[in-house]
Amino acid sequence: MKLKILAAICLISLFGSPRAKAEWNDSIRYVGELGVTASAGENTPFWMMNNRHGLSSRTRNNGYLRLGAFHDMDTTRRFTWGAGVDLAVAARFTSTFVVQQLYGEAKYRCLNLLIGSKEMPGFISNSDLATGNLTYAGNARPIPQVRAGIFDYADFWGTKGWFAIKGYIAYGKFTDNRWIKSWVDPNSSYALGTLYHSKAIFFRGGNARKFPLEFEFGLEMATEFGGTAYNTPYGPEVKMPGGIKSFLKALIPMRGSDEAPDGEKLNVEGNMLGSWNFALGWKTDDWSVKAYYQHFYEDHSMLFWDYPWKDGLWGVEARLPKNRWVSEIVYEFLYSKDQSGSVYWDHTPEINEQVSGRDGYYNHYIYNGWQHWGMGIGNPLFISPIYNNDHTMYFYSNRLWAHHLGFKGQPSDEIGYRVLASFQKSWGTYDVPSPEVRSDFSLLAEVNYAPRKLKGWKGELGFGMDTGSLLGHSYGVSLKISKTGWFLGPKNKKK
């Protein structure tokens, strides 16, 4: 019922009253897309499946048909609004019918409000070429939420563009209950009805219009809370706190209430995680280069520098001077073997010492871990639970290092390409170490063609492969055909 109400609101926003049509009908964009993937081996190749906002499938030989209509916000106006409906029917996916996006949004000056599910890029790194941010990477399906804040950098008063801020606060709910119940091993640990919270604040120093050096830093935090947990150390079925106080404890991490399990009372209520983010860039009209570092944390110890920061994602992104072959290139190195060390101990009256190691990135002893519909919400090199043949909600590969290279170009006005290549080694987890070090090499090469004579049409052909002991051997090809245009707008509306 809630989904139908939200759909009605978005449709009214898109195709509402005649007066609204007269004012806004030149900005209603439609998108139709058909995608198919054929592969051999154990899975759909890694980069054909990951970082696609969850609209993909591990199962070989899959496809989807996607239709969407969007009213895009006009950022030149003081007040503007937007809405979107994006639906898909799929074969050999986790569900046959997919509500990929369904949202309404508004902006007044620098203040934003979003209600619903919308695909959004992560902070700092390049969404086309990088592996993905550590907290949110656009790897899983969007989570329905209410999000408010300053979504784009806004200048501080009186700084004349030399200092800017952005950030948000959001609450929502995971939508994968039905899929979890149908897929998960009923004897394993899992949770249903989980609530979602996230927030971020980022600062930018520098003014590229006057001097090309810019610096960014920020903190991103998220929490899973509420719901019902099954097969936990505290019993076969545990109702987790989800009242007003729990919403506050998600906003400001605090120890659990009297209704929470003992472990939550000793630490914080819910599954808290996040990342520190830093970037330093040099930007001109013709080219730019940016170096960045992201540090992930699972608890207070790494949030507040109780232990050395040995883990992290290091990256360099370059936009090259205009040329025919390579326009952008990204290199990244990911290291996550330390996780505050191999020892964890909660202080007791007998041994009043706290050792906060074994952070267990993306995993939690009560909740499903940092995933939605089986796909990790953060960086996909931490292999998602959807890959688990034992059907457990667990990230079996979170102690790893990886090298990644991505680049793209536009050899002509009609033809473009993208290449992603990653190599990683995994030691499993501290709790479930791999018997031997496992490795994987994953490659994706895509070519897209947008003919000038067929305005709005675009075709994309891709080749992907995996080889190694971590994901096994897989090879595949993908074909995507899309059409973008405008409803009710003037014939000369530009793409």
Image (cartoon, grey):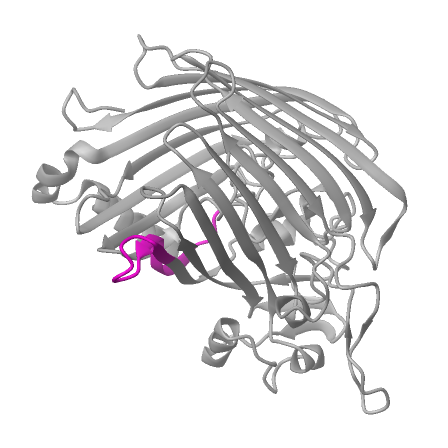
| On-image quarter of the N terminus | bottom left
Q: Residues in magenta?
A: 142-165
Asked if residue 329 lies left or right of residue 344, the reply is: left
Q: Can you say which quadrant of the picture contains the C terminus?
A: top left
Q: Is residue 93 above or below residue 142?
A: above
Tally of numbered discs: 0
Vertical placement of residue 40 versus 261, above or below: above
Q: Where is residue 463 in the image (x, y as percent from the top left)?
A: 62, 19
Relative side of 469 to 141, left or right? right
Give residue 136's position: percent from left, percent from top.
54, 50
Res 333 → quadrant: top right
Q: Can residue 352 be seen here? A: yes
Seen at 55% across and 32% down, the residue is 129
Q: In which quarter of the image is residue 383?
A: top right
Which quadrant of the view contains residue 471?
top right
Identify which residue is drawn at 72% across, 66% down. 365
Q: What residue is at 57 percent from the left and 79 percent from the top? A: 254
The image position of residue 15, as x and y in percent, is: 19, 40
